Image (tube, coloured by chain):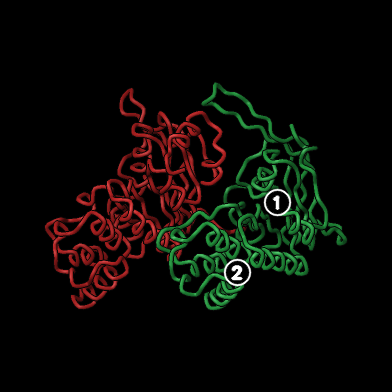
Chain colours: A red, B green
Amino acid sequence: MSAGEEALLTAAGLTKLYGARIGCVDVSLDLYAGEVLAVVGESGSGKSTLLSLLATQLRPTHGRIRYRMRDGVVRDLFALGEAERRFLLRTDWGFVHQDARLGLRMGVSAGGNVGERLMAVGWRNYGSIRGEALDWLARVEIETGRIDDLPTTFSGGMRQRLQIAKNMVTAPRLVFMDEPTGGLDVSVQARLLDLMRGLVADHGLAVVIVTHDLAVARLLSHRLIVMRHGRVIETGLTDQVLDDPREPYTQLLVSADLRG
Amino acid sequence: MDPTDTALVRVTGVAKTFVMHLRAGATLPVLREVSFEVHAGECVVLDGPSGVGKSCILKMIFGNYRIDAGSILVRQGQQWTDVARASPRDLLRLRQCVIGYISQFLRTIPRVGALEVVAQSARDHGLEAASARARAADLLGRLAIPERLWQLPPATFSGGEQQRINIARGFVAMHPVLLLDEPTASLDQKNRAAVVEFIRHRKRAGTALVGIFHDEDVKRQVADRSIDVSRFRA
């Protein structure tokens, strides 16, 4: 690759054991700006554990993650202080959950949810916070007239778009997504996927997306990791892995995918 | 590097076997000892009966199928990259800048209009937004896609219209290597002629083309030479 282009995130030998039970074993990966990496596998494959490790919600039993901070300095994520880690989580990173209730405060208005992230990074002017919130609501196609409504009054698709707005308002460089389209109707999924594609392209976002839906992986990701029993069993360009799967388990996954 | 070397693609000793684990690990050898070169400004046609592995060769050059032996070198400026050994990121870069591929089917993206689908391909190749749109509009016009369809997502189009969007998307970017998998299969006479003209234009521009053509008439009009893929049958 072009010299001087450095990975945003590099994980080496990530292992998480829950006592005798395996979360994930010896996972190594690089992630670059503008790149979408999908992690697929069925439940219990370790894909959610991997996501939690990458997002520093869990500490690994072994292994480490290096991350290039906004100032260009590469840091060991698990050596960050708690304050530094929190700052990273609410500025440079985003996290879109399958269950919007984990990513939103349901008792706070849509505008409040978006504005909260800005206030956490020091914005104080009410007018500019509201202006920025309105701008992001419009970008994720939520009618700006809904800014004062609670997310409880939103549909499933709107809640996911609100989560995305909330995450994007601080211009993160890396967004983690855990089954973001899970449980949505197909037409609602399409709208969300289209929005996410646009954000990746326009903002040069790096994304790690965990999904069991191969159609989502195909549409959104450049590279694919297939996990089973906590291990990475196959990896490559998304179209390579899906069109020419080599491992028995990957062939099974692809053959079971109705939408091809 | 030899300055008189005009090869842009060099396939050497390539083999491909599919292992079907869901059928008790049955192996399906498809190709062996595939070797050929494609030079700037020529159109090489892959010939042979259906199922012999013609599309497979295009997919291997594009890096969509992995290979079991040999090498597939593709030239970018003065630098050769082996598609079979390139990192995923190098391969993505190569597809963006060097290797274009027009597959038989359009994989549609929900909610993105036809013009935008084509323009996006041009932007991916480095054109700025306004000229990408202009080039996209020009190609859609020449492929007789009515202007009232340009803003609509191609998912709703007929098979023939989708194929023309696919063709426009492939030709809008000026990749120096272009792979064509039956681009004229379900087109009428007029649109076939448009595609023949696109191919001739690209040959004059120094593009190296590798194609599969069902239509004998089209084949005759564009081919500089043919390779009988049967001789690579495993």
On-image quarter of the N terminus of chain B: bottom right
Query: Which quadrant of the figure has residue B34?
Result: top right
Which residue is denoted by mark 2 in the rendering?
B143
On screen, residue B83 versus residue A53, left or right, reads right
In the figure, is residue B192 to the left or right of A256? right
Could you tell me residue A9's position as x and y percent? 45, 50
Q: Residue drawn at (70%, 47%), measured in percent from left and top?
A: B82
Q: Which of marks 2 and 1 is nearer the N terminus?
A: 2
Of the 4 image quadrants, the one containing the C terminus of chain B is top right
Q: Can residue B85 be seen in this view?
A: no
- Left or right of A260 on screen, residue B57: right
Q: What element carries label 2?
A: loop
| Residue B33 rendering spot, x and y as whole percentages | 78, 36
According to the picture, the residue beneath numbered tag 1 turns out to be B212
Q: Is residue A33 left or right of residue A51?
A: right
| Percent of width and height locating residue B155 | 45, 58
Residue A85, position as x, y percentages in the image: 31, 52
Residue nearest the observer in this picture, B91 or A154: A154
Q: Which residue is drawn at 47% across and 30% down?
A: A249
Amino acid type shown at disc 1: Ile
Q: In terms of secondary structure, where does tag 1 sit? A: strand
Residues at marks 2 and 1, CA–CA distance in whole angstroms = 20 Å
Residue at image point 23% right, 70% down? A143
